[in-house]
Amino acid sequence: MAEFNTLVVRKPCFGLPTGCPECLSAYIYLKFAKIPFHLDFHLNNPHTDQIPYFEFGDCVAYNNEREGIVECLKKDVGVVDLDSGFSTVPEWISTKAILTTWLADALAYELWLGGEGSSAYSIYYSDLPWPLGKILYWKKAHWVKLKHGITNDKAEVKKEEIYERANSGYDALSTYLGEQNYLHENRPSSLDAIFLAHGLVVLQTLPESSVLRIKFSEHANLVRYVQQRQTEILEAAPSPSSVPQFHAGSSSYASRSQSGSKPKNKPKKEKSQEEKTFKRKAKYFVVAQLVAVVVFLTLMTTYDDAELELDDGGLDYDE
């Protein structure tokens, strides 16, 4: 394929080329398939389900098309189909089901609801203005709750259910992998890309106290698998000062300022009337953002209370 292929992902963090599990699995799949590509980063709409997407020639394959970005790469882009000969094998099908349901659900729960949410915020929203990033984070966390039917009275039950399934999934994968280098027939497939992305995000973005990270770490061969594959195919994630412009301007001030001598302090000058006016307007803007956050939280709380009342005292159609 042409050398100007570009994979657009969410930003690098936690020592990974990208902290987003979907983006990372697409990155790994392309590495397994030995397809040359450039890596670019998208910060404008971190909540969109189009990311990751792959630009090739005048065409683009988005993550929200077909069954995700990997299927688009195989069927639309013409990337090597690493799953050839596997898709009808019962063990391969059941392994894919475990990865895309039990383990995907557990990672989503851990990122958005399992702790303070600092990992998810860093991966998806840390480059946005604080109020906007927090609103989008709370909106996503609320969506995860609705998806799994998590309410205040069912939170602990759902939590135990999610972690039990994840642990069962790890047990099954550990047995299936054994001492092999890959999950099926000792050669890479899309399942390896999905699972390696999952394992890297669990081990490198979640805190050591994370329940999911602890359960994963109890399976020595899974940890070995992730570490070996990481060494083989993942390039060192670019540092914040050396990352390309993230679709921004052409300034390279960050790298220049870090490599050069320490800048001298300029003498202070009295603020002009325009500067004073700008600072006053900036304060009003911050206040307006804070008000928007308060209003959002109030509406979300009201919605949750109404939803719980409906669950507790709703209509019973069996009567």
Image (cartoon, rainbow, N blue to C red):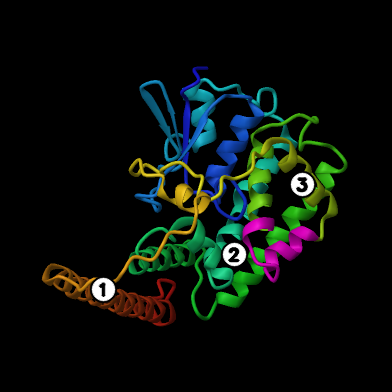
Alpha-carbon neighbours of circle 2 within 10 Å: few (<14), some, or many (≥20)? many
Q: Which residue is mark 3?
A: 227
Between marks 3 and 2, how big is the CA–CA gap? 21 Å
- Nearer to us of marks 3 and 1 is 1
Other residues around mark 3 within 10 Å, as few (<14) / some (14–19) / many (≥20): some
Earlier residue among tags 3 and 2: 2
Give me the residue at 34% from left, 75% from top: 300
Question: Mark 2 is on which residue type?
Answer: Glu
Q: Nearer the viewer, residue 272 or 99?
A: 272
* Residue 87 visible in rendering: no
In the picture of the structure, the residue carrying the numbered disc 1 is 286
Tag 3's secondary structure? Answer: helix
| Magenta-span inclusion, residue 87 | no
Q: Is residue 169 above or below residue 38?
A: below
219 relative to 314 in the view: left or right: right
Residue 229's quadrant in the figure? Answer: top right
- Tell us which disc is closer to us: 2 or 1: 1
Identify the residue at the far top of this view.
Answer: 1
Residue 85 pos. (x, y %): 69, 23
Q: Which residues are magenta?
A: 203-217
The percent position of residue 147, horizontal first and vertical second, equals 48, 61
Q: Position of residue 317 (x, y in %)?
A: 40, 71
| CA distance for labels 2 and 1 | 31 Å
Q: Nearer the viewer, residue 160 or 190?
A: 190
User: Mark 3: which amino acid?
Assistant: Gln
Residue drawn at x 64%, y 39% is 235
Q: Which mark is residue 110?
A: 2
